[in-house]
Amino acid sequence: MRVLLTGASGGVARMLRPLLAASGLQLRLSDLQPPDDLQAGEDFMAADLADAAALAPLVRDMEAIVHLGGHSVEGPWATILKANIEGCYNLYEAAFQAGVQRIVFASSNHVMGFHERGDKVDAERMLRPDSRYGVSKAFGEALGALYADKFGLRITNLRIGNVAPAPVDRRRLAIWLHPEDLCQLILIGLRHPDIRYETFYGMSDNARAWWDNRRAQAFGYRPRHRSEDHAARVLAVAEAPDPIADRFQGGAFCSQEHPHPPGVPKP
């Protein structure tokens, strides 16, 4: 399968590229600048997703796209709008025009960030974005629904937690995603014959999870890595309290710019 990987210079893509290549995919990498660890034989094309005219050659002859590109943290609205909303629309439209069959979209846990930590949520629950960044990922999920239902693309949204070799704090014990488990989710989106439009949570086997990921499991997802294996080390480290971040699933994305005084979260 010929697959375009956007955001190829980012940290998540760096962990994924060898795993996806070893899975038999023929990758075309794209970002604003080439990865600093670009390997011999890797196919790279620079492109700004906000430049619609630049995307036709980028998606040409691709069977699928893994869309990691965009602004990956909270930012000013103008930045989010250009990178995550205009860029996402341009990519989906170019993919449709080029006959791309599947897109795996890197959504985010931050589309659900204002759900409380005691509330276990599945993919059908109401979106509660915690930031402009989270809003942009909610837009991407909605855009995927349009291109699936109206134009027939096969779309998989992955509401990714935190991708890393190991969780580093209490919150990440609930949302951690090992790169090998992320690769498995991506391959389900690229290969499963019954995918039409699906939303999965991007997490490993996390005993402290806030998310119900039975939909991913129904498509064969079997995470290999367990956050609880790291719990003793993580819990031994003291963390400064934050009454808003500690209440909601989005953590610091919820407390950032929050107008209520410390210790008095909004009811």
Image (tube, grey):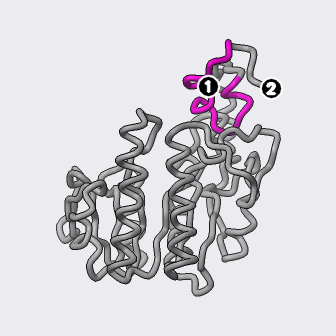
The answer to whether residue 165 of the structure is visible from this angle is: no
Residue 258 lies within the magenta run: yes
Q: Nearer the viewer, mark 1 or mark 2?
A: 2
Find the magenta span and give its range: 244-261
At numbered mark 2, what does the secondary structure look like: helix, strand or loop? loop
Residue for point 73% across, 52% down: 126
Q: Earlier in the sequence, mark 1 or mark 2?
A: 1
Residue most extreme to the front: 150
Instruction: Name the residue nearer the viewer: 142 or 45.
Output: 142
Which residue matches tag 1? 255
Residue for point 56% across, 50% down: 108
The numbered dot on residue 134 is none
Instruction: Name the residue nearer the viewer: 14 or 54.
Output: 54
Q: Amino acid at mark 1?
A: Ser
The answer to whether residue 48 of the structure is visible from this angle is: yes
Q: Amino acid at mark 2?
A: Pro
Which x, y percent locates residue 30?
27, 61
Q: Are marks 1 and 2 in contact (CB under 8 Å)?
A: no
In the rendered image, which quarter contains the C terminus?
A: top right
At numbered mark 1, what does the secondary structure look like: helix, strand or loop? helix
Which residue matches tag 2? 267
Residue most extreme to the bottom: 193
Q: How crowded is the residue under tag 2: few (<14 C-alpha within 10 Å), some, or many (20+)?
A: few
In the rendered image, which quarter contains the N terminus?
A: bottom left
Q: How crowded is the residue under tag 1: few (<14 C-alpha within 10 Å), some, or many (20+)?
A: many
Asked if residue 122 lies left or right of residue 183, the reply is right
Q: How many marks?
A: 2
**Placement of 193 over or under 142, stated as above or below:** below
Residue for point 51% across, 58% down: 140
Which x, y percent locates residue 163?
51, 50
